[in-house]
Amino acid sequence: MPGFEVIDEKEKKAISRIFDEGKVFFAHGFDKKRKHYHVREFEQKLKTVFSPQVADTLCVSSGTAAIKVALKALGIGRGDQVITQSFNFIATVEAIVDTGATVIFTDVDDTLNMNPKNLESLITKKTKAIIPVHMLGVPSDMITINRIGKRNKIPVIEDACEAIGAKVQGKYVGGLSEFGVFSFDFGKMITTGEGGALFSKRKSDGKNARMYHDHGHKNIPNLPRGLDRAGSIGFNYRMTEISGAFGKVQLEKFPRILRESQRRYITLEKYIKNKQIKFRHVNSGNEPNYDTFVVSIEDKKLRNKVIGLLNKAGFGTKNLPDAFNWHCAYFWEHVDKKIRNKEVTNCYNRLLKCIAIPILVSRPIIDYKNIASNINECS
Ligand SMILES: Cc1ncc(COP(=O)(O)O)c(C=O)c1O
């Protein structure tokens, strides 16, 4: 969440510098007019920080676009099935549906992300991709999910839109599978207003993704763009130079964002002592990005009291239960009329008991200490 909270003169200067340095807002060409290729530089920086081992990092216009580009790079379309989880954001599902493929939903485990056992039982000959989603900054069980993907020869696309900075066994999410996806929309830990990035582990996938996001352009070096030939059918999911320049500044602020978020998250973890309140499970060896602190409360009366306290203190409850219907497949009858199957209903019942406490770096730590002690007093 905090990306927007730390915007200051630095982002403003970075954008106004584009005006001073040739006014080129397009990521490609205009070589003689420009001093920078901001989008390309942002891509390189993201790769260096988060996943030097991947073959390619591509910036695109949104996280939704990044998922769609990954699916298209794999050639996924009508007749194929893509498995994702019931606790999700509608964008992931929209990207799948937009390719013509069918969405299959898994249940969630104690991390509230994809349940690997359930995943395995849902794989068919038609399954062409698996999309685990690190919801609200907590990593999915990527070790098991990647193993299942490999065993069945099905590529995995990590939806890390909400989890930039989270780690699995010391490695950043987003670079752990065939593809990884980030969002830089206005609610994310790093924002460019709107924007996204796609990490491709395999060179051929990276090449396909780059072509698809830019009308099929091969972008052959030293060839004028107008003479460049299409390597595939494509679309326009390009990022603008404004977002690229903005993103570079936000990335420099990221260590502070992460550190300050962690301090607030740890305060809640330390000071909430009410035994009726269970903390969301994080698998051993994994680390969240401290974007949101999720708790589960069985007793409805207590739950409502805690929700009331959070609203009164101005924190709100992010998407649990705020905006719950945008984040749980149980509500998505517009995607599939028979959506309320066993997996989706199990997930709904679990999420119904959860509350998401947003971590805001603009709120002092004492606010988190106070809300924890108010919550402790509830019964
Ligand atoms: C899990 C998840 N996937 C995908 C997206 C889509 O990202 P964007 O808003 O950049 O299109 C989001 C955005 O909220 C998200 O939370």
Image: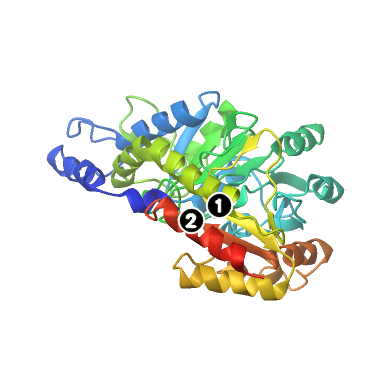
Foreground residue, 270 or 294?
Answer: 270
Residue at 60% from the left image edge and 55% from the top image edge? 272
**How many numbered markers are drawn?**
2
Q: Position of residue 5 (x, y in %)?
A: 35, 53
Q: Nearer the viewer, residue 196 or 226?
A: 196
Is the residue under label 1 in contact with that under label 2 (CB below 8 Å)?
yes
Looking at the image, which residue is at 77% across and 49% down? 115
**Visible in this render: residue 99?**
no
Q: Is mark 2 within 8 Å of ligand 1?
A: no
Q: Is residue 246 visible?
A: yes
Identify which amino acid the numbered label 2 is placed on.
Answer: Tyr
- Residue 85 point in image, percent of width and height: 71, 54
Q: Which residue is farthest left?
A: 20
At 63% from the left edge and 74% from the top edge, which residue is drawn?
A: 304
Q: Kindly indicate the quadrant of the structure image that contains residue 150.
A: top right
Query: Label 2, label 1: how many angstroms apart (C-alpha)?
Result: 6 Å
Q: Callout 1, which amino acid? A: Leu
Residue at which label 2 appears = 368
Identify the secondary structure beneath mark 2: helix
Task: Give the labeled residue for mark 1.
Answer: 268
Q: Residues within 10 Å of mark 1 (few under 14, many from 20)?
A: many
- Which structural element holds mark 1? helix
The location of residue 218, given as percent across then percent down, is: 44, 33
